[in-house]
Image (tube, rainbow, N blue to C red):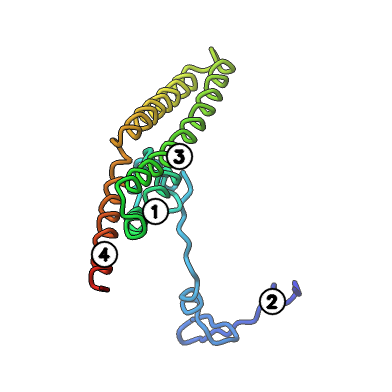
């Protein structure tokens, strides 16, 4: 860029109105109308707790805490088409033994998901325990935060253990998937029988 042109930028002044116009014919107000204004969202302009979350926008919002049911593996399990699986198995096998085997397969799959999550929580708990030893006596706030995180993880691990036990008996969270499978199985059996009867 030529510095001389920048310093001696020509402008036209209308003596009657004293409005400055650039060579393109736009007034300063017109030129500013094309400017996109970005939000100023630094911590000093919007102190925490003094500005509503909606005003800060999604990018500045803190992540919402999620529970165990929001973990992707558990969501993935419940998003499976258990009804469709039951309907397929009912139409093809039509026996009580097939129904029980299908239920056991669902229970086993769910328990495997929970055991994997439990092991991940256990590994995280071990890391926090090591961190607690490393920061012991350094800062009371840090120690309290680590202890709180350890309690939260211990609670999650206890819930996972309970759900693993409940699943063995066909109770707890897995019951939704089992009921959906059983409804689908019954539908599949009735459709298969009806088809065979109408075909004769």
Q: Quadrant of residue 188?
A: bottom left
Secondary structure type for disc 1: loop
**Cβ atoms at labels 1 and 2 below 8 Å apart:** no
Question: How far is the residue under mark 4 from the one under mark 3?
Answer: 32 Å
Which circle, 1 or 2, is nearer the viewer? Answer: 1
Residue at the image position 35 percent from the left and 55 percent from the top: 93
Circle 4 residue: 191
Q: Earlier in the sequence, mark 4 or mark 3?
A: 3
Circle 2 residue: 8
Circle 1 residue: 80
Which circle, 4 or 3, is nearer the viewer? Answer: 4
Instruction: Estimate the x, y position of residue 45 in percent, counting from the top left.
Output: 44, 48
Q: Quadrant of the N terminus?
A: bottom right
Circle 3 residue: 113
Q: Earlier in the sequence, mark 4 or mark 2?
A: 2
Which circle, 4 or 2, is nearer the viewer? Answer: 4
Q: Earlier in the sequence, mark 1 or mark 4?
A: 1
């Amino acid at each position: 860029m030529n510095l001389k042109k920048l310093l001696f930028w020509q402008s036209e002044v209308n003596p009657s109105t004293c409005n400055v116009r650039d060579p393109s014919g736009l007034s300063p107000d017109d030129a500013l109308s094309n400017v996109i204004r970005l939000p100023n969202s630094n911590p000093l302009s919007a102190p925490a707790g003094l500005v509503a979350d909606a005003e800060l926008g999604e990018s500045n919002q803190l992540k919402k805490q999620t529970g165990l049911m929001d973990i992707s593996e558990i969501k993935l399990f419940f998003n499976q088409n258990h009804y469709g699986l039951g309907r397929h198995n009912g139409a093809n096998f039509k026996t009580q033994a097939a129904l029980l085997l299908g239920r056991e397969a669902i229970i086993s799959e769910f328990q495997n998901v929970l055991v994997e999550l439990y092991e991940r929580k256990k590994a995280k708990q071990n890391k926090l325990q090591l961190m607690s030893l490393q920061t012991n006596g350094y800062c009371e706030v840090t120690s309290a935060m680590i202890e709180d995180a350890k309690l939260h993880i211990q609670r999650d691990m206890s819930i996972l253990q309970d759900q693993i036990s409940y699943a063995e008996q066909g109770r707890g969270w897995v019951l939704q998937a089992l009921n959906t499978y059983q409804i689908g199985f019954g539908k599949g059996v009735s459709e298969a029988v009806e088809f065979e009867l109408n075909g004769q």
